[in-house]
Amino acid sequence: MSKKKNEFRPDDFVVYPAHGVGKIVSIEEQEVAGMSLELFVISFEKDKMTLRVPTHKATEAGLRSLSSPDVVAHAMKTLKGKAKVKKAMWSRRAQEYEQKINSGDLIAIAEVVRDLHRADDQREQSYSERQLYEAALERLIREIAAVSGNDETAAAREIDGVLGARAAAA
């Protein structure tokens, strides 16, 4: 067993790469295939989903604490940057965006939001672009809200402000 087993406790907010911010509701023992397993029970309220992750595999699975305020500040700075859109085919770019979103890395998620954000006067987004943008934006909003202790509306306004200012400066 890893020594970091009890790094997380009930009521901690954590980030699970494939699902974003969740809250550990409990740590329970469960018998699986005749073996006793200790599991983190993580609730993703917005998605009405509960995930059970073996405590000894949590770090391997990418479970992590919320980002530090420094990382959040870096993510916000990333949003201010110029969109970097590669000339690769959309299917290839979409795959890269998806990987960044599911990495659970806040900076990578901010890059996706920055690169797919459209100002009102820009061309329409395709359905798949919009889906990826909204998925990344939602992850960003949830983690920033959880880190700052604000609600998601306040976090969304903060992000909109940054993206709006960037569009106005362009």
Image: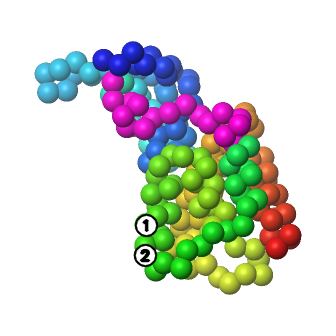
Q: Are marks 2 and 1 in contact (CB under 8 Å)?
A: yes
Q: Is residue 151 visible?
A: no
- Label 1 is placed on what type of residue? Gln
Count of numbered circles in the view: 2
Q: How is the image coloured?
A: rainbow
The answer to whether residue 34 is above or below residue 70 is above
| Residue drawn at 71 percent across, 35 percent down | 69
| Residue at (58, 54) in percent of width and height | 109
Q: Residue 164's quadrant in the figure?
A: bottom right
Left or right of 33: which side holds 89?
right
**Quarter that holds the N terminus:** top left
Q: Residue 113 or 36: which is nearer the viewer?
A: 113
Q: Is residue 162 above or below residue 15?
A: below
User: What's the magenta region?
Assistant: 56-72
Determine whether, in the image, residue 19 is placed left or right of residue 114. left
Near-viewer residue (162 or 46): 162
Q: Which mark is residue 91?
A: 2
Q: Is residue 4 found left or right of 106 in the rendered image?
A: left
Q: Residue at x 74, y 43 (%)?
A: 73
Question: Residue 113: where, in percent of width, then height?
Answer: 63, 61
Residue identified by numbered label 1: 95
Residue 79 coordinates in the image, percent (x, y): 71, 57
Secondary structure of residue under mark 1: helix
* Amino acid of disc 2: Ser
**In percent of the image, x 55 and y 74: which residue is there?**
86
For residue 47, the mark is: none
Q: Secondary structure at mark 2?
A: helix
Mark 2: few, some, or many residues within 10 Å (few <14, many ≥20)? Answer: few
Circle 1 packing at 10 Å, graded few (<14), some (14-19), many (20+), is few
Please determine whether, in this image, residue 86 is positioned above or below residue 44.
below
Residue 58 sits inside the magenta stretch: yes
